[in-house]
Image (cartoon, rainbow, N blue to C red):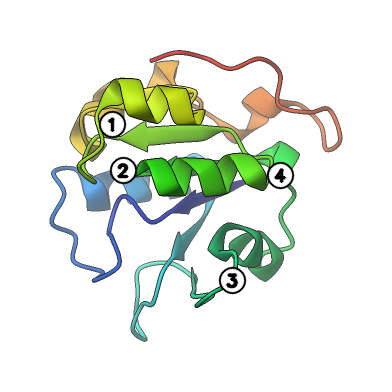
Amino acid sequence: MTMISAAVFGTDWQPGLPGGAELLGECATRGWTVVLTGPGPAGAPAPAVAAPGGDAVRAALELVDGVPSHAVAVAGSVREVRAARRAGLPCVALETGGDAGPELRAAGAAEVHRDAAALLRVLDDSLLARPRAFGRVGAGTGGPRNG
């Protein structure tokens, strides 16, 4: 299972979002392989991938031999939600990139949360609750959940 996130740390890799570092840590504890998208420096808290002019979501999946049916993207903008959807990933969106909930949902986000701290508070009821919630490899992701 893979969680791909540009939203939690952002492209400057500063854990400035409330709950960002804690969310990544909790997801890793639950069994997610966390891959951060964007141009990150050495020593980033998780494997990082940058695909300038390319598809960072697909590159992140390839980095860890992940498959869309066993991955979830965490996005902070309509652009990131659309990229996740193009790659076939369900997406949890955070309203930290300047886009509001209705726009994020219209772009295809399965869940929208105010920020990483808000998502962390309801993690047990989200797409990120547990990787095994998706079933065996090849079983698909099931229906979207709303949060």
**Along the polypeptide, which appears first: circle 3 or circle 4?**
3
Q: CA distance from mark 4 to mark 2?
A: 21 Å
Quickly name the residue at label 2.
23
In x, y percent, where is residue 14? 18, 66
Q: Quadrant of residue 143?
A: top right
**Along the polypeptide, which appears first: circle 4 or circle 2?**
2
Task: Say if 86 sits above or below 105 in the image.
Answer: below
Question: Do the CB atoms of the residues marked 4 and 2 lie less than 8 Å apart?
Answer: no
Q: CA distance from mark 3 to mark 2?
A: 27 Å
Q: Residues within 10 Å of mark 1 (few under 14, many from 20)?
A: many
Quickly name the residue at label 3.
54
**Along the polypeptide, which appears first: circle 2 or circle 1?**
2
Quickly name the residue at label 4.
68
Q: Secondary structure at mark 1?
A: helix
Task: Say if 78 sits above or below 144 in the image.
Answer: below
What type is the residue that disc 3 sits on? Answer: Gly
Image quarter hosting the N terminus: top right
